[in-house]
Each structure stands twice: as C-alpha cells, then as structure tokens.
Image (tube, coloured by chain):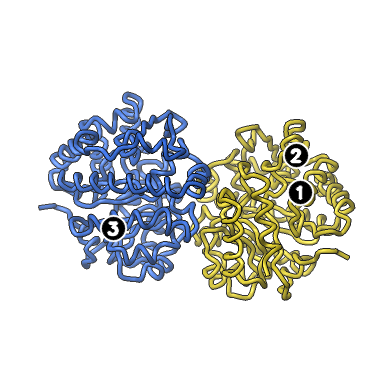
Chain colours: A yellow, B blue
C-alpha cells in the first residue's frame, strides 16, 4: 500500500485535498548530485546500470519531495533494443550512426525480446520499488512512435526534423512500417514495465507539435492510440504531446487517464479542448522557475486556481532546465503542498 | 500603378478570382543562384549592399513568380543599428559578442538615426522598386521586439531562449526598457521603409510561441500592438507569430490587415480564433514541399478550399527550407495560380 497515493487519486479523477506534483526531468541536471554521477558515468551507462538508474530516480524524491517518482531512463533505449544503435554525445545530444532512410534500412530493425534487450530497465524498476518502499508511486515512460521515428530517421536532434518529415512525405509506406514496429515494441516494453511494478506510464510525444493536425492524425496519433488502447485497462496512461494543443480533443476521448499540456495552452483552453472531464497535467513554463521564490509560489497558486484542484496534476509544461537552482525547484513543489 | 495587385487586394479584404501567393524566405537557400552569391559574399555584406539585396529580392520573382516580393534583409540589422553588434557565423547562425544581461548593458544601446545607420536598407528598397518596375508589390519587414530581445539577451540562436526568458523574469524593468527601445526603433525603421516605397510590412514574432499566453501579453504583444497602431493608417501591416495560435484573438482586433498562421493551426481554428473577419496568411508546412509535385498541387487546392479564396494569402507556415527543390517551390506557386 502506497503511503502517498495522491498522484494515483488524481489519475482516477478522485477528489483530493490538494493536487499532486512532480516535474518532468526531475531527476536531471539541475541536481548537483546528478552532475557528480554524470561526470563519472556516460549517459547510457547510467540508464543501463540498475543501481545507478535507481540512485538517480530517488535523488529528487529525497531532495525536493514530489508526489511521484519517474524512472531515470531515456526514450531512445527502445531504438537501441530494435537494433538501431544510438549514441549520446556530450554537448551534442543523441547520434544515430545509421539512420533509417529507406525500406531497405528497415529490414535490420527488429521487434525485440524485451527481457533480453531491455531487462536492465525492468531490474531498475524492481530495485527502485524496493528503495522507494511504497513512499510514492513510480512512473514508467516511453516516447511516442512518431517522436522515436524523428530520431531514427533524422539521425540526431533537430529544430524541424525535416529529414524525418521528408521521409514520411516521400516514403509513407516505409514510415508506417517503422511506426508500427516501434508501436509493437513499445506496447511490449510498457507491458513488461507494468509487470515489473510501475504504477502509471507516460507517453512523451515530444515532436508531435511539429506536425499539422492533418499529418498528426496520420503519423502520430493512431500509434499513440494503439498504445493507450493496449494498456489502459491495466494501468493509468498519461499522454503528453509538446505543442499538441490541436490534438487535445482526440486525447480526451482516447482512454488516457491524464493529458499533459504545455504552457502555451492556458488552463481554460486545455479544459475546453480536452472535453472538460479528463485529468490534466502541467503546465508551468520551466523558465519561470527563474522567478524569485515568492513569485514562484504566487504563480503556482494562480495556476492551481485556474486548473482547479481536482482532476489536476501539477507539473511543468516540459522538462526542468539545467540552470534552475535546486531551491527554486523545491519552492515549486512546496508551493503545491502549501496550497489549500 | 501595380500590374499585379492581388496581394494588396487580399490585404484590403476585397474579393479576388484566386488568392495571392508568396513564400516566407522565398529569396533563400533553396535557390541555386542565391547559393552562388552566398559563397561569394558574407551574410551582412549581402544585406548591406543595395545592389546585392536587390538582386536577391528579384531572384524568386524571376524564377517562381509569386505575387509579392519581400526585401532580402535580416531582422537583426535593427540590433546592429542600436549598437548591439551582431555577427553571422556560417553553420552556427547569429552571434552577439556582448549580449544584454543587465540594465548597465542597456546604457550603450541607442535609438538610432535610421538613415544614418540603416540607409542601405532604404537604398535597397528604392533600387528594388525600380527593378520590379511595378510588376508586384514589395513587402518590408521587421522582427518583433520580443524576438529581437531573444537574440540580444541570449546572444545566439537557441531552442528555448532560456537566458532571454530568465532576463525577463528576473529583471523585468530592464527587459521592458529594452523592449521599448526596440519598439521605438522599429517604428522609425518601418516608417522610413514606407517612405522608401514598400507596399506592406510584416512583423515576424518568430519566438512569441515560446511564451505562455500570460507572458506573451506582458513581453511581446503590447510592443507589437504599438507598432501596428503607429503604422496601420499608412500601410497594411501583417503580423506573424510562430506558434502564437493563442494570440490570434488579440491579433484579430489589433488593426493589422492580415495575420500569419503556422501549420499547427488549422484553417478552421485560425478563422475561429481570429474572429473570422481579418485576412489570414499561411500555412503550408514547409516540409510538405518534399511531397511529390502532384501531391503538392492537391494539398494546395485543399488548403485554399479550407481557408476560402477571399481574405486569404497563400504562404508557407514558416520559411522555405534549404533542401526544397526549386521545381517543388514553383509547383506550390503554380498550384495557386491554377486554382479556380
């Protein structure tokens, strides 16, 4: 039995005394202790070593006390498991030496045995659950198929992912092949995470907002919907699409327990567009954590008043930035806890 | 008298046989002739030499025949004139050696004499007008004060412009000082462009979409509104905010003759959010120009049907990408011309 189940209550739409709070990338570079491990171990070593992943996952729980933990990992481990090698280059970001550019490139791509290729994630979940000792729920996550395609095809981070989009527009059949393979893998992956003990899952569609609504409904949304449909009866699913305000209506009808929104979508617009019944999560501009602390507190109260305390999970509208002082991050969490 | 005034008719909301078409960055890197000049002259030499700026402005008119020309220049020349030096580094983008980070840094910033510091732009306009020989209208442009602040403070391009946002949140008075200085300069600059002969002006708020609606109404919109108010009785003003769907309602009431929208906002949403009366401009996803040509034609017809032929200017939702084949760009323009 979880000691703090506020987060799960909000996902179920139950009435709460205050909304729960966590932060995307809460186990990240703004934490000095994280930076110590970052200097010592490379990125994928941190992801692939259960002991390290657990240590990192727990850090923000100890230091800023949010109402949920999210397993330290990366959306790109799924591509690695599918035999699309991914490197992480310091100061540059992800690097895919052999990006997918044709149907032929796709032949090497597999739907992997999850325990064989991603067993280390499951081990990290089990270890983290022991360490958390039922204090707060643990969230598992995956990237959306479209977002993973962006990296697999572009080969690196990008402002517009124009090669990825060009691939979809000029070779739609190959694109759909890849998207379906990622979807199938993601469903297997998240089902294994559920077995390993996560209490909720979040799907990150980080690059969905690069698509027009029409193309979103071709290349992104149908695959996210497949994932939600496959999981929703087993676990609460949160779907977060950066810049995807135009898809909130579909998301609201999808069976997801909650929808993440970014700060360009006001609480009022988000409630209206999502249909008014589903739990919302967000949407503090991460840069706003640079405000003086009393202003952060004020802004958090205002945000809760706008979203309403029920069917709401306080979060940022995207990941916390590396330049945020820890006491500002803590002030964000504390403000929510002092809300009444 | 202009031989082709379709663009101005659309800006005035008059009924037309087909909508006019032009493309943001139409005088850009997808044109092989542009690349020849790019290899020969550095970026600001091209901006600052009226003969070169004119030659580049005319290139797309000769090669793909849109219904309007837009003067080749850059939004950052305004910062240079204000004594904030800007360099353009190949493969890196803009570089500001001494970014604005405090009230003290602001002391060096001037509201310049336009003809002294930006006379070369006026010369380029006059020369271009002669070369165009009344064939199509000429558009002048400026960056929004917020977008220019982003560069002046961040010091370079950025995904989140977190230093610029941090500056606004932690030193709001200095931020407003800088924004007002940029606004005053921009109004003088655009008024001088009008005297020199441009037929319309467009304000680019390229980074407005990084702000929440609340912060947009503090740090971006009031300054854009000042510019529109100062110019709207003299010339048609187009306002384009990338990712600024949430501001369409304000924009619709601002006195601007047209509002640019990007591809994340459907025609229906754009008409609804902007109030339904103002001319709209956009919103083809630039990556979609990688579609096979027959598909481009089809998609353009569909887009015109969705926006409606009146009170509409066909354009991309952002600048054309360097990797677009010229015949695909021409197919986009030709599709509009064949619409009936």
Could you say where residue B267 lies in the image, as x and y percent from the top left? 40, 65
Q: State whether discs 2 and 3 lie on one chain.
A: no
What residue lies at 42% left-to-right and 59% top-to-bottom? B217
Corner quadrant of residue B49: top left
Q: Earlier in the sequence, mark 2 or mark 1?
A: 2
SS class, disc 1: helix
Would you say A177 lies left or right of B90 here? right
Is B170 drawn above or below residue B55 in the view shown?
Answer: below
Between B79 and A193, which is closer to the camera in this rendering? B79
Could you say where residue A45 lies in the image, as x and y percent from the top left? 78, 36
Would you say A166 lies left or right of A9 here? left
Q: Quadrant of the C terminus of chain A?
A: bottom right
What residue lies at 57% left-to-right and 69% top-to-bottom? A306
Could you say where residue B288 lies in the image, as x and y percent from the top left? 45, 51
**Mark 2 in CB contact with mark 1 (< 8 angstroms):** yes
Residue A196 appearing in the image: yes
- Chain at tag 1: A
Q: Residue placed farthest to the left in the image?
A: B1
Q: How far apart are labels 2 and 1 at the CA level? A: 10 Å
Q: Which residue is mark 1?
A: A63
What residue lies at 19% left-to-right and 44% top-to-bottom? B192
Residue A33 is tagged as 2
Q: Which residue is mark 3?
A: B338
What residue lies at 66% left-to-right and 44% top-to-bottom? A106
């Amino acid at each position: 039995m979880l000691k703090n189940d506020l987060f799960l209550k909000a996902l179920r739409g139950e009435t709460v005394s205050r909304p729960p709070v966590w932060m995307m990338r809460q186990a990240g570079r703004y934490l000095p202790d994280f930076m110590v491990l970052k200097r010592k171990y490379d990125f994928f070593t941190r992801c692939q070593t259960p002991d390290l992943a657990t240590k990192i996952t727990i850090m923000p729980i100890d230091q800023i006390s949010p109402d949920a933990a999210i397993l330290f990992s990366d959306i790109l481990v799924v591509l690695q498991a599918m035999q699309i090698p991914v490197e992480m280059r310091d100061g540059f970001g992800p690097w895919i030496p052999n990006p997918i550019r044709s149907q032929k490139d796709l032949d090497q791509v597999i739907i992997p045995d999850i325990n064989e290729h991603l067993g280390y994630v499951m081990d990290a979940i089990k270890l983290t659950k022991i360490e958390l000792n039922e204090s707060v729920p643990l969230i598992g996550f995956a990237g959306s198929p479209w977002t993973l395609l962006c990296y697999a095809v572009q080969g690196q981070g990008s402002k517009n992912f124009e090669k990825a989009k060009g691939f979809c527009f000029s070779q739609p059949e190959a694109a759909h092949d890849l998207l379906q393979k990622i979807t199938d893998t993601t469903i297997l992956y998240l089902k294994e995470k559920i077995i390993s003990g996560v209490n909720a899952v979040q799907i990150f569609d980080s690059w969905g907002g690069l698509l027009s609504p029409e193309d979103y409904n071709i290349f992104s949304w149908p695959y996210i919907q497949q994932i939600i449909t496959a999981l929703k009866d087993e676990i609460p699913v949160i779907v977060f699409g950066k810049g995807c305000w135009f898809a909130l209506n579909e998301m609201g009808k999808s069976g997801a327990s909650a929808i993440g929104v970014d700060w360009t979508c006001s609480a009022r617009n988000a409630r209206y567009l999502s249909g008014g019944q589903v739990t919302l999560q967000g949407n503090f501009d991460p840069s706003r954590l640079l405000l003086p602390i009393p202003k952060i507190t004020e802004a958090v109260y205002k945000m809760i008043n706008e979203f309403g305390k029920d069917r709401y999970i306080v979060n940022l509208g995207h990941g916390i930035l590396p330049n945020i002082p820890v006491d500002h991050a803590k002030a964000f969490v504390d403000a929510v806890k002092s809300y009444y």
